[in-house]
Image: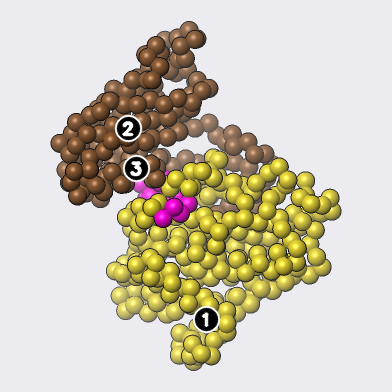
Chain colours: A brown, B yellow
């Protein structure tokens, strides 16, 4: 029951780095895995618009992500059990240098860390703070899971109020 | 399957405060401890319901009672609300219903601590149960959840975070022990949260979940975080508060302490 194996998550789940910038940053960086022999790569796009907006760093799943000891299957995405980190190149932007590191569990993105972010301007300081490891952003997913209770604003509609919470609270299959 | 015992667990759901209150106890329950819990929730309704003209909070709002006339419970909650108002820079404010910019609506009191009362009542209910020697249970009051101990010796309580648009789904799952999980949101049309600083509906987020030791604080902070929108999330992160926010753009933002208890 403690197994959290809920719905399989999409491998193309994007991670978002919240960036507040005065202008627009667009980065396209080729990532290289720490294990050079795999030849895996992922394209990372960081786009930012006006101040206070959220911009996404869509981290596409590697098109071919194969451990060095197994044969590569061209054209397919191979799920790798081991967790690994991929550090992106240091990229210069008009606001300063940017470098991020992603952690993948197989092909699933589990973490994005900002290694370097612009910090030389007041706007950019807030970029670094917002994009740091303490806040993560991702796409909303809808799951069915074994749970003991549901936390959420209660529905006031007739029917739901009568049944939803109790039913969900009981739903521990 | 029952921690500390082989004799029964209790699951009880009652409708109070216009919502469902679930009590899931995995320990044997002493005689009337369950009744005491639900009596307590009814007392809280008597004191704090903004839907009832005879509640203490409604009478205070009409000026029929002064602060000195109030019960200890009501004074305690009002003091706590003042504290959170300061902490949140006015984003949590129980006087929003008295703001002339805000259109009156049923259930919104001129003095309205509803954003904290559910959590506070859960904290006190949990204390009462623990005083009876009950240590493994879950209470869910309309989406604010308090857990103590474990559902079974080898398991932790698994709490789903309601998906904002799909009623049969959850957006995340956390495993918690001795914690409160409070969610504030505007999932339904017209169910909006007013920004006390502008008098207008809060923008940007559809739900915020806060996890913490104290359900009253978690509840009020979730409401304040809804009001502050994306701009308030940094402060929660920097304060080390476990929080998850769902934006109206279907983006989910979580703080690092939240990630640590998240299992789905």
Where residue B154 appears, as percent x and y from the top left, is: 71, 42
Residue at disc 1, secondary structure:
helix
Q: Which disc number belongs to residue A132?
A: 3
Q: Nearer the viewer, residue B91 or A132?
A: A132
Q: Which disc number belongs to residue B75?
A: 1
Instruction: Provide the residue designation for mark 2.
Output: A100
Q: Quadrant of the C terminus of chain B?
A: top right
Question: Disc 1: which chain?
Answer: B
- Please report the residue visible at 60 percent of the width from the left and 75 percent of the height from the top: B44
Give residue B190's quadrant in the image: bottom left
Q: Nearer the viewer, residue B155 or B161?
A: B155
- Please report the residue visible at 46 percent of the width from the left and 11 percent of the height from the top: A68
In the image, farthest residue toward the right: B7
Residue at disc 3, secondary structure:
loop
Distance from Cα at disc 3 to Cα at disc 2: 10 Å
Where residue B27 appears, as percent x and y from the top left, is: 77, 56
Check disc 1: other Cα within 10 Å, few if <14, some if 14-19, many if 20+. Answer: some
> Mainly helix, strand or loop, the magenta region?
strand
The residue segment tinted magenta is B239-253
């Amino acid at each position: 029951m403690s197994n959290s194996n809920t719905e399989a998550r999409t491998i193309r789940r994007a991670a978002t780095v919240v960036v507040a910038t005065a202008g627009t940053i667009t980065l396209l960086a080729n990532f290289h895995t720490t294990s050079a022999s795999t030849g895996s790569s992922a394209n990372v796009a960081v786009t930012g618009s006006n101040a206070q907006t959220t911009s996404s760093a869509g981290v596409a799943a590697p098109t071919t992500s194969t451990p060095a000891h197994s044969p590569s299957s061209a054209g397919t995405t191979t799920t790798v059990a081991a967790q690994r980190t991929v550090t992106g190149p240091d990229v210069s932007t008009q606001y300063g240098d940017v470098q991020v590191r992603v952690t993948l569990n197989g092909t699933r993105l589990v973490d994005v860390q900002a290694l370097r972010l612009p910090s030389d301007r007041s706007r950019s300081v807030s970029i670094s703070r917002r994009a740091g490891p303490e806040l993560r952003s991702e796409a909303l997913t809808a799951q069915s899971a074994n749970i003991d209770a549901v936390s959420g604003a209660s529905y006031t509609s007739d029917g739901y109020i009568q049944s939803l919470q109790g039913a969900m609270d009981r739903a521990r299959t | 399957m029952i921690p500390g015992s082989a004799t029964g667990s209790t699951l009880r759901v009652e409708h109070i405060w216009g919502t469902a209150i679930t009590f899931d106890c995995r320990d044997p329950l002493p005689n009337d401890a369950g009744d005491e819990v639900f009596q307590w929730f009814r007392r809280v309704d008597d004191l704090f319901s903004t839907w009832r003209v005879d509640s203490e909070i409604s009478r205070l709002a009409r000026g029929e009672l002064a602060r000195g006339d109030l019960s200890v419970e009501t004074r305690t909650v009002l003091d706590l609300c003042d504290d959170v108002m300061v902490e949140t820079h006015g984003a949590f404010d129980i006087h929003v219903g008295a703001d002339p910019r805000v259109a009156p609506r049923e259930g919104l009191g001129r003095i309205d601590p509803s954003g904290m009362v559910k959590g506070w009542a859960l904290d006190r209910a949990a204390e009462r149960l623990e005083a009876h020697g009950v240590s493994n249970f879950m209470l869910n009051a309309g989406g604010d959840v308090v857990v103590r101990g474990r559902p079974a010796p080898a398991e932790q309580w698994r709490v789903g975070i309601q998906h904002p648009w799909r009623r049969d789904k959850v957006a995340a799952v956390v495993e918690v022990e001795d914690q409160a999980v409070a969610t504030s949101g505007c999932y339904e049309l017209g169910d909006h949260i007013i920004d006390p600083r502008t008098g207008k509906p809060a923008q940007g987020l559809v739900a915020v979940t806060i996890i913490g030791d104290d359900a009253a604080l978690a509840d009020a902070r979730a409401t304040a975080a809804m009001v502050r929108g994306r701009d308030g999330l940094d402060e929660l992160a920097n304060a080390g508060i476990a929080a998850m926010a769902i934006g109206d753009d279907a983006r989910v933002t979580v703080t690092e302490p939240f990630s640590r208890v998240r299992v789905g």
